[in-house]
Amino acid sequence: MLQPLARPFHLVLVSPQIPPNTGNVARLCAVTGCRLILVEPLGFSIADRDLKRAGLDYWDKVFLKLYPDYDTYLADWPEARRWLFTARSDTSLYAARFEPGDHLVFGSETRGLPPDILAGGSGTSVAIPMLPERRSLNLSTAVGIAAYEALRQVQFGQVAGQAGSSS
């Protein structure tokens, strides 16, 4: 069973475009204690019924912060450790060593994180391993994989390659 973290992970979506994906991530936040951060521009309204439907009745359990742009988000969280998720990184998610309070940053469904964010020095880029010649995973699936790997490492003290059973 998961326990709430004193310093929860922050799941940061930069310019998400598809309401059900964001709703699914909100639901993930509600059941894991992660915090949700959205960075505009969004491809939908926060009031979108598809967004609300995907989050079901969990919205009151989700910490949601909305930023007008990535620079404003960075200014509000200058000391945060950031993991920038991209399908084009040579570093695997499983090489990352997550710590409580880390920010896991994801780009839009159609474009991923912009090149200026990836090259801007605001975090370490990592990828979720996939078979060759595959473009990407669904955004909410990728966020779920990353969040649960971070939680596994922190809650259960296990990192990839460590002896012992997996959780």
Image (cartoon, rainbow, N blue to C red):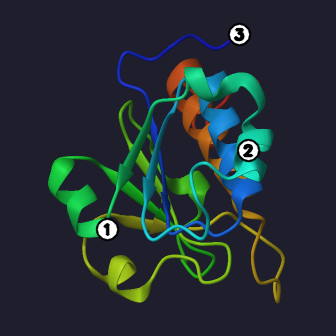
Is residue 164 visible in this depiction of the protein? no
Would you say 87 lies left or right of 99 here? Answer: right
Frontmost residue, 108 versus 92: 108
Frontmost residue, 13 versus 23: 23
Question: Which quadrant, please, contains the C terminus?
Answer: top right
Q: Amino acid at mark 2?
A: Asn
| Residue 32 sits above or below residue 81 on the image | above
Marked residue nearer the N-terminal end (1 or 2): 2
Q: Amino acid at mark 1?
A: Asp
Q: Quadrant of residue 16?
A: bottom right
- CA distance separating discs 1 and 3: 36 Å
> Which residue occupies 71% across, 65% down?
18
Would you say 109 lies left or right of 41 here? Answer: right
Judged from the image, the secondary structure of the residue bearing numbered disc 3 is: loop
Would you say 130 lies left or right of 82 here? Answer: right
Marked residue nearer the N-terminal end (3 or 2): 3
- The residue singled out by tag 1 in the image is 69
Judged from the image, the secondary structure of the residue bearing numbered disc 1 is: loop
> Which residue occupies 41% across, 87% down?
115
| Residue 160 sits above or below residue 68 on the image | above
Which label sits in the foreground, 3 or 2? 2
- The residue singled out by tag 3 in the image is 1
Frontmost residue, 86 versus 19: 19
Is residue 71 visible in this depiction of the protein? yes
- The residue singled out by tag 2 in the image is 24
- CA distance separating discs 1 and 2: 22 Å
Q: Residue 56: x and y, percent?
A: 77, 31
Pointers 1 and 2 in contact (CB under 8 A)? Answer: no
